[in-house]
Amino acid sequence: MAFTVYVLFSESFNKIYIGYTSDLVQRLLSHNFLSKKGYTIRYRPWIVIHTESFDDKTHAMKRERELKSGMGREFIWKKIRSKQD
């Protein structure tokens, strides 16, 4: 089973969310419409700004942790700023 590490961006609130899933379409629907509680409901709507695919959950989880680190978040914010220019 393939897994996707994804980064969501809420332009309205200038927030990011980093996660991984085996079904990106369903997960995005959940973040934007279906969830009733949790961090992401407060900052809707979300758009996907970055994805990376992995063959297994272990590697996806490792990359998710890397993106959540200081250097990973710096990488993400640079990507966001470059798209806004």
Image: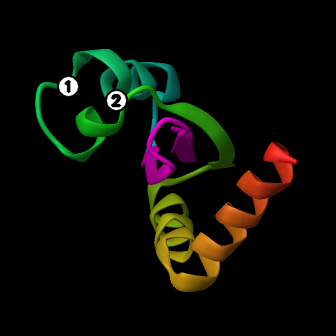
Count of marks placed on residues: 2
Kindly state the secondary structure of the residue where label 2 is placed: helix
**What numbered label is drawn on residue 35?**
1
Query: Image point 50% across, 20% down: which residue?
Result: 25
Q: Which residues are magenta?
A: 1-20
Residue at position x 20%, y 25% in the image? 35
Q: Quadrant of residue 49?
A: top right
Residue at numbered disc 2: 31
Whole-percent x, y for residue 47 in the image: 57, 31
Relative to 16, residue 74 above or below:
below
Q: Quadrant of residue 4?
A: top right
**What is the x, y in percent for residue 16?**
49, 52
Q: What residue is at 30 percent from the left and 16 percent from the top? A: 33
Q: Which mark is on residue 15?
A: none
Q: Residues within 10 Å of mark 1 (few under 14, many from 20)?
A: few
Q: Is residue 42 above or below residue 31?
A: below
Query: What's the amino acid at mark 2?
Result: His
Q: Position of residue 15 (x, y in %)?
A: 46, 51
Q: Is residue 47 above or below residue 58?
A: above
Question: Viewed as shown, does residue 76 lie left or right of 79?
Answer: left
In screen coordinates, is 54 left or right of 39?
Answer: right
Q: Is residue 8 magenta?
A: yes
* Residue contact at pointers 1 and 2, CB within 8 angstroms: yes
